[in-house]
């Protein structure tokens, strides 16, 4: 059972500033910021304990939940009480806990699940964020400094975390794919290559909506089994294949459209130019490259992309970019921005890119 969240039912998070002077208000606002990590820590614990899955069928008492989640009942109640106060769960008048629409996003079996993302952000990523000062002081990568290896080697050495990270990225794609489909007509192309396409979540969804289009999921060999399973399950074997390889070496040639979603933000400018030059070499004169990334807003206004940028600084050494920075980067690979499409998701805009010339 899932309870819909109303605007009035989810209070503002943190400390109230009603009836205080400006100095006190500023202190309370800062206190909200400082203690902001408490909330995702609680969410990640609930995700690791599969609480949303346990509540998917029916409401349960804390005694029932504690047995099924193998937890101390008193401690679990305190966690649930806190999460109820911000609308993730709700406690009914029978003292049973129920899912809300927000909490439903933590279920394993829903499209666009954010469960894996919550776990990833509050495990290996969280520890690296605790070492953020290293990145800011040196310009180096906090993750590498903490773990003694880059994030990709870490996932190779810790396959369970790597598998969870793959699920996290798939969940993000599924939660926002409709916003991408609404802004771009993929049906105008004959063949689409999704570079770094992972398990094919984006491309297979595109192909189900554009039934005359063929596709290639291009990624490292470790994604082959999962991608092929998805192709089979979605009955796309006649129109979609997986091709293994590294975009640092080459990409499949002569497609009408190339997609790179949340790929280039993982890498520094020099590495991005190397990747983009390989894409340029593969493109026909009329081919299009769709770069699906956050575009950071200029100025002092809040933009989620500015904090995603800090995540890249700490975890991969990559970065999020402004529209101006994207254009400057693409010129170095003899590419140009032809159009910029905003989506309804703050995490994604679409840069439609073509060849600057055919050198």
Image (tube, grey):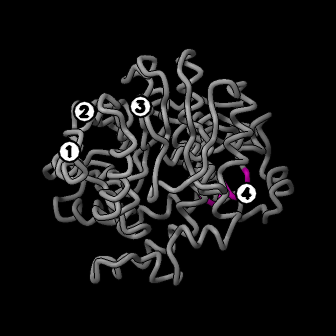
Q: Reading the chain from its start, which is encountered first: label 4 or label 2?
A: 4
Q: Kindly report which numbered mark, 3 or 4, lies closer to the viewer in this rendering.
A: 3
SS assignment at label 3 = strand
Disc 3 crowd rating (10 Å Cα; few below 14, some 14-19, many 20+) is: many
- Residue 76 in the figure: left or right of residue 32: right
Residue 49: which disc? Answer: 4
Region rendered in magenta: 44-50
Q: Is residue 202 above or below residue 149?
A: above
Between residue 321 and residue 212, name the one nearer to us.
212
Residue hosting label 3:
257
Q: Position of residue 342 (x, y in %)?
A: 29, 31
SS assignment at label 1 = helix
* Residue drawn at (63%, 49%) of the image: 167
Q: Is residue 315 above or below residue 6?
A: below
**Decide: marks 2, 1 in contact (CB < 8 A)?**
yes
SS assignment at label 4 = loop
Q: Kindly report which numbered mark, 1 or 4, lies closer to the viewer in this rendering.
A: 1
Mark 4 and mark 2: Cα distance apart in space: 41 Å
Q: Position of residue 51 (x, y in %)?
A: 72, 49
Q: Reading the chain from its start, which is encountered first: label 2 or label 3?
A: 3
Disc 2 crowd rating (10 Å Cα; few below 14, some 14-19, many 20+) is: some
Q: Quadrant of residue 312?
A: bottom left
Mark 2 and mark 1: Cα distance apart in space: 9 Å
């Amino acid at each position: 059972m899932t309870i819909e969240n109303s605007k009035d039912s989810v209070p503002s998070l943190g400390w109230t500033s009603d009836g205080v002077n400006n100095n006190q208000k500023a202190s309370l606002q800062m206190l909200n910021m400082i203690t902001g990590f408490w909330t995702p820590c609680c969410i990640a614990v609930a995700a690791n304990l599969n609480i949303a899955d346990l509540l998917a069928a029916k409401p349960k008492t804390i005694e029932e939940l504690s047995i099924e989640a193998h937890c101390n009942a008193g401690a679990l109640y305190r966690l649930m009480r806190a999460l109820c106060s911000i609308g993730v769960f709700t406690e009914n008048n029978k003292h049973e806990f129920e899912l809300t629409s927000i909490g439903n996003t933590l279920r394993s079996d829903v499209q666009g699940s954010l469960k894996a993302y919550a776990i990833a952000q509050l495990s290996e990523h969280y520890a690296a964020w605790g070492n953020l000062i290293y990145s800011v002081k040196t310009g180096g990568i906090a993750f590498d400094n903490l773990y003694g290896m880059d994030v990709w080697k870490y996932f190779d050495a810790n396959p369970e975390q790597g598998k969870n990270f793959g699920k996290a990225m798939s969940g993000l794609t599924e939660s926002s794919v409709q916003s991408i489909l609404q802004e771009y007509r993929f049906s105008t192309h004959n063949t689409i290559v999704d570079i770094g396409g992972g398990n094919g979540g984006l491309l297979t969804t595109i192909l189900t909506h554009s039934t005359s289009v063929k596709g290639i999921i291009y990624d490292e060999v470790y994604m082959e089994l999962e991608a092929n399973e998805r192709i089979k399950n979605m009955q796309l074997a006649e129109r979609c294949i997986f091709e293994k390889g590294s975009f640092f070496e080459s990409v499949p040639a002569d497609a009408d459209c190339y997609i790179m979603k949340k790929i280039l933000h993982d890498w520094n400018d020099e590495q991005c130019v190397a990747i983009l030059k390989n894409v340029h070499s593969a493109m026909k004169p009329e081919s299009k490259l769709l770069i699906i990334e956050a575009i950071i807003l200029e100025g002092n206004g809040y933009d989620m992309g500015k904090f995603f940028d800090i995540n890249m600084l700490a975890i991969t050494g990559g970065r999020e970019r402004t529209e101006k920075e994207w254009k400057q980067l693409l010129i170095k690979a003899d590419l140009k921005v032809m159009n910029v499409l905003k989506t309804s998701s703050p995490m994604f805009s679409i840069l439609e890119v073509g060849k600057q010339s055919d050198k």
